[in-house]
Image (spheres, helix red, strand yellow):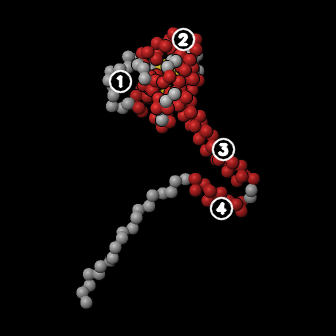
Amino acid sequence: MKQALAPSLKIIENKIHVIRGHKVMLDKDLAELYGVTTGVLNQAVNRNKGRFPEDFMFQLNSEEMKNWKSQIVISNSSAKMALRKPPYVFTEQGVAMLSGVLRSKRAIQVNIGIMRAFVQMREAMIAHKDLAQKLSAMEKKYDHQFAVVFDAIRQLMEPPPVQPKGRIGYIVSKEKE
């Protein structure tokens, strides 16, 4: 199989949003990745409704729709976006279930890429959380003499502040000799 069928992890990660506390992908974004129309994707899902319980797929409500439009597509009206009704969103499990509904070679490769993106995002979140927890545990375990060390580590974890650069060159005196 050709690897060119799968989109890059960065492209996929940019299409993953957090809605209702779940990492999800919009039906229109999935359709674009799979190379089908949103209507074709939703039709395949509707034919297999039993495979998509609410924790796999749900439709945005009007409040979520307003928030989504303001965050993602500020300048486009619903008409320009071709939205007649709120989109469906798919959780990681819903995306995995799509591979059983859409059976093209492209769908298989896209699903593999999406699963890798979800895993990579989860691992990054866990690693950052684990590091902060370990640092807190160590700080509690050791006495105050190591406070300086822990403060230094915390400072290293934060990005450095941007400082203006000084002027370069000679200072010319206006006095005449």
Question: Which mark is nearer the camera, 1 or 4?
Answer: 1
**Circle nearer the N terminus (2, 4):** 2
Mark 1: which amino acid?
A: Met
Regarding mark 1 in the picture, which secondary structure is present there? Answer: loop
Of pointers 1 and 3, the one earlier in the residue sequence: 1
Are the residues tagged 2 and 1 within 8 Å (C-beta)? no
Which residue position is annotated with label 3? 130
**Residue in front for this viewpoint, 158 or 147:** 158
Which mark identifies residue 81?
Answer: 1
The residue lying at 44 percent from left, 61 percent from top is: 163
Residue 148: numbered disc: 4
Confirm or deny contact between disc 2 and disc 4 (CB under 8 A). no
Q: Nearer the viewer, residue 1 or 145?
A: 1
Q: Which callout, 3 or 2, points at the residue further toward the start of the chain?
A: 2
Give the SS element for disc 2. loop
Q: Residue 37: x percent and y percent? A: 41, 19
Q: Which of pointers 2 and 4 indicates the residue nearer the eye?
A: 2
Name the residue beneath numbered marker 2: 48
